[in-house]
Amino acid sequence: MKSDSSPAARPGDRRAAADPHLAPGGQSARSRFAPRPRAGLVLEARDEALLRDLFRLRVLSRQQVQRLHYGSVSRCNRRLRQLFDGGYVARHFPPAAPHNAQALYTLGPQSLPRVRERLAADGLEVTEEDLRVQSRRPALSLLEHALAIGDVYVALCLALRDDPAAALARWVPERLGWQEFEIRRAAGGGGGGAGRWRREVFAPDAVFALRCPSEDRHGTEVAPRWFVLEVDRGHVNARQFRGKARVHRHVREAGLFGRLYGAAAFETLVVTTGERRLANLWALARAEGGSHFRLTTFARLAAGPLGPIWSQASPDERACLL
């Protein structure tokens, strides 16, 4: 009989073969889909900033998180794994090819009390429902749009780091910026009576303010400049965009924005897919009295959102944001 010179299999190896979640030797392998809770994690300042950003944006990709907070890929992956295991972030994967896809992150259950406490310290009161909604991953139909908003946010934050004269004073996500109001229609030509009241909804992708600089050359404090962000991925038709531009004009003219944010006016920033689309949207906004609209493209955004990438006077003319 021929002897078998191969070493005997160890019990731990047999367990690993039977259980795909066990590594050789009986040690539990870390799954990218399930956390391994560990105590003793101490949050750093950049972790707290990440949790704030996840509340603002609802979802960020690993690449967006890396650009904002952690520098290298290895450092980012290591820290996100620790935050995932600690329950501070939740990890998601697209249903198609989840094993090879880049992870997406939302707020985890352990982070919610800390986020609410930090927001309250910043003067922003949020409800439990606000926290629950902002910690849920957007539906698949809205996911790409949410990530596109994140791209604009990341570009803005990185540009502000290189400009010491400017700073992000406030960022209001869509849920907190949503407002419903009523406006009276113009009186009909033949009826002679006042027009009916019409319900309108002001629901931009975000509202934010930039402080730049705090004082002018005379030493007078300068108020922050307010902007309303609309990310356009080409899914809105002409009628819908004109309706959005009309609502923005009504919010300005009726003084609603001033009552909400204490600012006399705002500018609407539209980031869209290409130059042809930009020219069409510019004409639609102008048709609704949208002279306060500034438009750019995702391709232009790569040069930095503070630079000369915004079209306002005409589709071809470009000016700086500030």
Image: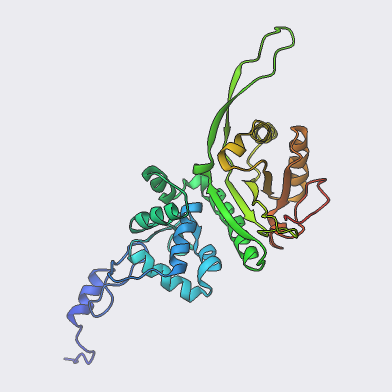
At x 43%, y 46%, the residue is 125
**Depth check: 246 or 215 in front?**
215
**Depth check: 39 or 61 in front?**
39
Left or right: residue 85 versus residue 94 is: left
Horizontal and vertical percent position of residue 78: 42, 73
Residue 30 vertical position relative to residue 129 in the rendered view, above or below: below
**Depth check: 221 or 199 in front?**
221
At x 56%, y 48%, the residue is 145
Horizontal and vertical percent position of residue 189: 74, 11
Which quarter shows the C terminus? bottom right
Horizontal and vertical percent position of residue 31: 34, 67
Left or right: residue 313 versus residue 298 is: right
Horizontal and vertical percent position of residue 235: 63, 41
Which quarter shows the N terminus? bottom left
At x 49%, y 64%, the residue is 62
At x 66%, y 31%, the residue is 250
Res 110 quadrant in image: bottom left
Res 210 quadrant in image: bottom right
Residue 262 vertical position relative to residue 112 in the rendered view, above or below: above
Residue 215 makes an appearance in the image? yes
